[in-house]
Amino acid sequence: MNILEKGNFVEIDDVFLTRSLDVFQGLSRIQEEFDKNDTDTFMNEVRDSVVAKYLGYTHINTLKHGLDARRKSTNKKYDFDYLEVKTASFESQSWQATFNDTNLEKADLFTQPNVYLALSVWKGAADLLFVVYGKNHLLGHFLREKVELFLSGNGGVRSTQSIPIYKLVNDFEMSVYCINKTPDEMYNIFQIRNGCRTITHDSIKAISEL
């Protein structure tokens, strides 16, 4: 199938368009009030802030570069703990943390004991369902190997690594924290989801357990 044959073209829905623009106008007023006029950055900041608050972080990075949030460190050897937030849609075929244009410096950050990763899964624009969260020095080594493969010329056209949820939990020992589902409900969802059936019930916790 060539690119011209791909897609699902439907007639423009005027009701959908009008109602969506009404919502966008409200968002535009908030963007103007807080001087956050880049829409992608604005949406990322809102979502990252929600995830960070749930996980106990206090400060959000308002720039595109750098890690997404930080808090006073729980480890006396460090001033701050840092958080990288990845986002996936509940409707996606696979839930995975995607690292775009990763370099060796950023890969090595994830070997540090004060750098954490969160994969947040959302239904729609504002409904956060669960977060896969934790840290593991092996994650940094995995990312470094992928970047080195890319730099050797064997890894494609971009240094992009995608890590599925089952690998985050099973290989890197991260936990699933439920936001608006019980652990039992979340476990049942995983059991009917391709790529998630190997996630054990013990790996799934209520956010209140964090």
Image (spheres, rainbow, N blue to C red):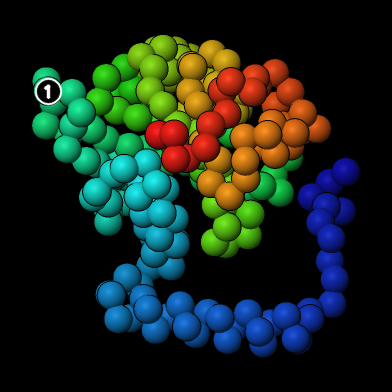
171, 150: nearer the viewer: 171
Would residue 179 be found to the left or right of residue 192 on screen? left
160, 39: nearer the viewer: 39
Identify which residue is drawn at 81% across, 56% down: 7
Q: Position of residue 171 (x, y in %)?
A: 54, 13
- Secondary structure type for disc 1: loop
Q: Residue 86, relative to residue 112: is it above or below?
A: below
Which quarter of the rendering shows the N terminus?
Answer: top right
Q: Position of residue 82 (x, y in %)?
A: 26, 35
184, 4: nearer the viewer: 184
Identify which residue is drawn at 30% across, 81% down: 33
Q: Position of residue 153 (x, y in %)?
A: 50, 17
Using the rendered image of the protein, determine whether residue 119 is visible from the camera's viewpoint: no
Q: Residue 111, relative to residue 89: is it above or below?
A: above
Identify which residue is drawn at 58% across, 50% down: 180
Would residue 16 be found to the left or right of residue 143 on screen? right
Residue to which mark 1 is pinned: 76
The amino acid type, in three-letter code, at marker 1 is Lys
Q: Residue 153, relative to residue 115: is it above or below?
A: above
Q: Residues within 10 Å of mark 1 (few under 14, many from 20)?
A: few
